[in-house]
Image (cartoon, rainbow, N blue to C red):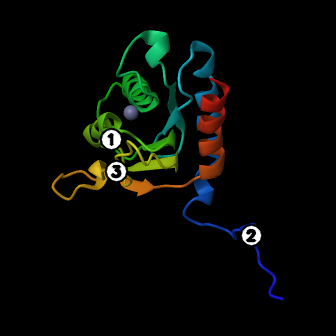
Amino acid sequence: MITEHHTHQPGPDPVRDPWRDSMRLALQEAALAVPAGDVPVGAVLLGPDLELLATGHNEREAAGDPTAHAEVLALRRAAAALGEWRLTGCTLVVTLEPCVMCAGALVQSRVARVVYGADDEKAGAAGSLWDLVRDRRLNHRPEVIRGVLADECARQLTDFFRDL
Ligand SMILES: [Zn+2]
């Protein structure tokens, strides 16, 4: 009888492993959305030397603002902290694949890299439904690293919707 290995035991992943600690921060930030009834999505913005510049979590309900997504808030706060709208060399780490609005904002901000956890098959704009951030017609195309702590990120969302 052939032994089947149903539990996937990944080895070192040199692409994703360096972002795991930042994704854990983003997961903690996402949890802050829940008390206001907001879907838990969290983002952290890292500077060129990977220093923490800003964080954000979904505040649509809390702020009554349709644009108050985690990514947009983190981008605004980082730009305010730097006194500069160009976030050259920066990395945005977010628990869920960005939507079209956030993907647009990420391109506008000129971040170097977008790291995300769970795919959003229904609205993702970084490879799932659209690939706005890497559209070849755009001059600026951030690098995309997907699937960092994907299971934890997806579970946080499914737990939230299950508890509703
Ligand atoms: Zn968004």
Q: Which mark is residue 103?
A: 1
Q: Secondary structure at mark 2?
A: loop
Mark 1 CB lies closer than 8 A to ligand 1 = yes
Residue at the bottom extreme of this rendering: 1
- The residue under the point 49% across, 12% down is 62
Residue at the right extreme of this rendering: 1
Distance (Cα) linking label 3 and label 1? 12 Å
Q: Which mark is residue 6?
A: 2
- The residue under the point 61% across, 21% down is 34
Percent of width and height locating residue 158: 62, 38
Q: Residue type at mark 2?
A: His
Q: Quadrant of the C terminus?
A: top right
Q: Is residue 103 above or below residue 85?
A: below
Q: Secondary structure at mark 1?
A: helix
Q: Which mark is residue 70?
A: none
Distance (Cα) linking label 3 and label 2? 29 Å
Q: Residue type at mark 3?
A: Leu
- Which of 1 and 13 lies nearest the eye of the viewer? 1
Q: Residue type at mark 1?
A: Ala
Local packing at callout 2 (Cα closer than 10 Å; few below 14, some 14-19, many 20+) is few
Instruction: Specify whether 31 is left or right of 95.
Output: right
The residue under label 3 is: 129
Instruction: Specify whether 138 is left or right of 7.
Output: left
Mark 3 CB lies closer than 8 A to ligand 1 = no
Local packing at callout 3 (Cα closer than 10 Å; few below 14, some 14-19, many 20+) is some
Of badges 2 and 1, nearer the viewer stands: 2
**Ligand 1 is found in which quarter of the picture?**
top left
Local packing at callout 1 (Cα closer than 10 Å; few below 14, some 14-19, many 20+) is many
Distance (Cα) linking label 2 and label 1? 35 Å
Percent of width and height locating residue 98: 40, 41
Upstream in the sequence, badge 3 or badge 1?
A: 1
- Which of 79 and 20 lies nearest the eye of the viewer? 20
